[in-house]
Image: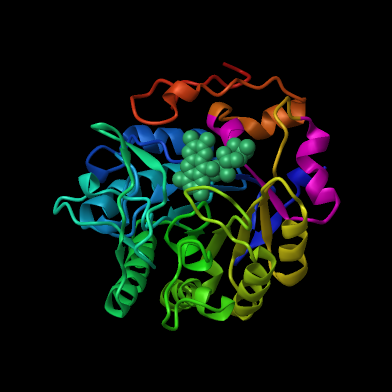
Amino acid sequence: MKLFEKVTVGKLELANRMVMAPMTRSRAYGGLVSELTAEYYAQRAGAGLLITEGTQPSVIGQGYIQTPGLHSAEQVAAWRRVTDAVHGKDGRIFVQLMHAGRIGHPTLYPDGALPLAPSAIASGEQLYTAEGMLDHPVPREMTLEDITRTTEDFVSAARNAMEAGFDGVELHGANGYLIQQFLAGSSNRRTDAYGGSVENRIRFAVEVVQAVSDAIGPERVGIRISPGVRINGVVEDDAAEIYTALMRALAPYGLAYVHVLEMATRELTELVRAEWPGTLILNPHREPGPLTVEAASEALEEKLADAISFGALWLANPDLPERIKAGGPYNEARRETFYGGDHRGYTDYPTLTG
Ligand SMILES: Cc1cc2nc3c(=O)[nH]c(=O)nc-3n(C[C@H](O)[C@H](O)[C@H](O)COP(=O)(O)O)c2cc1C
């Protein structure tokens, strides 16, 4: 079965085509991952590739409580324990660099600053904080200096990722966070070179990709996108144009992969597949219900993707490849322990063998 075949990502040969999708777990107290984090990822090292939870490249990039960073020596040392544990089990691991942009909040930053975004437009949504649910504030519109500095923050976080032993980085260009806030007309009303036309709205994404690729090598860089997603207040009326232009602009770089988070329709995935010459990881849209081996491998058989990522299923099933091979059964994910807490709902999901 194709899911169990090897696949090339950058210069890596992955043992199989099953990828663990990035998932925030909000257990990085003080911005630091722990021994428990190392155990959690090592338990799942049977994935062809693990992609970590969203990790902020800078203080102002944080979007949720208790998420890890990759902008201090202490954070690099903490992540090193995770990559060592995963590599000790022959796993491969990329870190997802996630700048939340306007999906941040002054309570998350020591100086109480406003979050940054392409334009001063609030998401219209709320976030969970230590003080309960709060509205996302109207963010501060980024100056050109802010844009340059933010690109540099991505670069230094990517260098830190190399120092921490990661196999690569995934830039989070999906789900309405900073990079997608630049792509989407609803969150980007800039009148300079970063807003307006599609060419201008993709500029920030392309510049970040270019700068990070120059720093650590394009074969170690992937990007996650969610064409047409309506989440965190972003609306892309012209998704087909945006992602055609973005894929064409990124094609020459020779990146490790594009990771598509698929929405309800398949057309945009097909469009990305047609435009993207490299490896494509697909997080397929899936109707609720039990997973079958056939459904899991369908997109590979149809050549729509080269690898498939699984989120909640992997969270709840550390030995997912064995379970897929056996046709199940699967542990149910416990939603109440998704974010925050301790080992419960984190490292205590049983494997088939106990
Ligand atoms: C608990 C949880 C946390 C998530 N955090 C992230 C994240 O940090 N970055 C990201 O790109 N997607 C995140 N996602 C989205 C998943 O990567 C995935 O796209 C989504 O769960 C749909 O895939 P699935 O049906 O296989 O779970 C998260 C999902 C869950 C369930």
**Left or right side of 166 for 80:** left
**How many labels were placed on the picture?**
0
Identify the magenta region. Answer: 292-315
Residue 259 in the image: above or below residue 291: below
Work out whether 200 lies above or below 235: below
Residue 252 on the magenta span: no
Quadrant of the rendered image containing residue 338? top left
Seen in the picture, residue 66 relative to 241 is either above or below; the reply is: above
Measured as percent of width and height from the top left, residue 62 is found at 31, 51
Q: Nearer the viewer, residue 92 or 308?
A: 308
Query: What residue is rendered at 78% in x and 68% in y?
Result: 274
Residue sitting at the far left: 111
Vertical placement of 233 versus 279: above or below?
A: above
The percent coordinates of residue 341 (x first, y second) are: 33, 25
* Quadrant of res 131: top left
Residue 170 lies, in percent from the top left, at 50, 59
- Left or right relative to 150: residue 184: right
On-image quarter of the N terminus: top right
Tell me, yes or no, whether the highlighted magenta stretch contains residue 293. yes
Q: Position of residue 225 (x, y in %)?
A: 58, 58
